[in-house]
Amino acid sequence: MQIIKRNIGLTVGESLMRVYVAAPEPVGQYPGILFYSDIYQLGRPITLLADRLAGYGYVVAAPEIFHRLEPIGTVIEPNDLGRLRGNDDAQRTAIVDYDADAQAVLAWLKSEDSVAAEKLGTFGFCIGGHLALRAALQPGVKASACFYPTGVHNGRLGQGTADTIDRLDELDAEVLTVFGTLDPHVPAEGRQQILQALDKVDVSHATLLFEANHTFMRDDGYRYDPVATDAAWREAVEFLKRALA
């Protein structure tokens, strides 16, 4: 399916948040997806994934997660300095601000004529995987796909300690988690904590485990694993198709 791409601006508090939107070109109504990047924001590896998802029949809205700290359009380079910068931005952003951003994008999706407002999902990578799971606590979200989500098991997200894992009983969404066995940021004990917490609540959830490293779906780094990426992608598309039917 061919897609159309554009950028919109949403004001959250006193900050203008750029949101990259990719949507199917044919006129119609489609499920809406709040799509989160990793700490490097909306570089081409991430927008390619957003575009790819839109091609399967979704309106995908990807916000710049550090819009309060970085100029509009900033892409953080995925190198040593960029990693320091992205992690610093992540730690300097208040958790309530992340929540406000989620509410703003979900409200925008619900207001769009091309979105079936009762079919909303979240999707994210790394810190974005955590943000996707946390955003699924918002009313109306029916599915959440979380790829190597950092900080869920230990509460590391922004300023203070995130209570995401303690609030999973508030979920009204099905959850898919995707992990790599070689990921030092979400070690085996962290994965177990997350999965055990999901088991304790009345939430339909599934998990995928690959012999892969952190950020294995970014196609611009040494940790990229195309075979694991393709397998994860197939499962994620089937998950969304079923959960947002």
Image: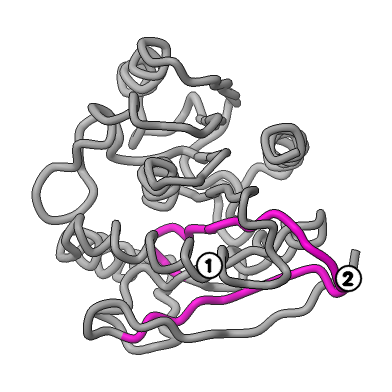
In front here: 236 or 172? 172
Q: Earlier in the sequence, mark 2 or mark 1?
A: 2
Position of 20 compared to 136: left or right?
Answer: right
- From the top left corner, tell me how far across and down residue 93 is, in percent: 19, 64
- From the top left corner, tell me how far across and down residue 21 is, in percent: 62, 74
In front here: 33 or 155? 33
* Residue type, label 1: Ala
Image quadrant containing the N terminus: bottom right
Task: Judge the density around disc 2: few (<14), some (14-19), many (≥20) Cα neighbours within 10 Å.
Answer: few
Where is mark 2, residue-wise? Answer: 2
Is residue 32 part of the magenta span, yes or no?
yes
Task: Judge the density around disc 1: few (<14), some (14-19), many (≥20) Cα neighbours within 10 Å.
Answer: many
Residue visible at 46% across and 38% down?
A: 148
Position of 60 compared to 157: left or right?
Answer: right
Residue visible at 31% across and 23% down?
A: 190
Q: Secondary structure at mark 2?
A: loop
Where is mark 1, residue-wise? Answer: 62
- From the top left corner, tell me how far across and down residue 100 is, in percent: 29, 63
What segment carries the magenta color? Answer: 16-41
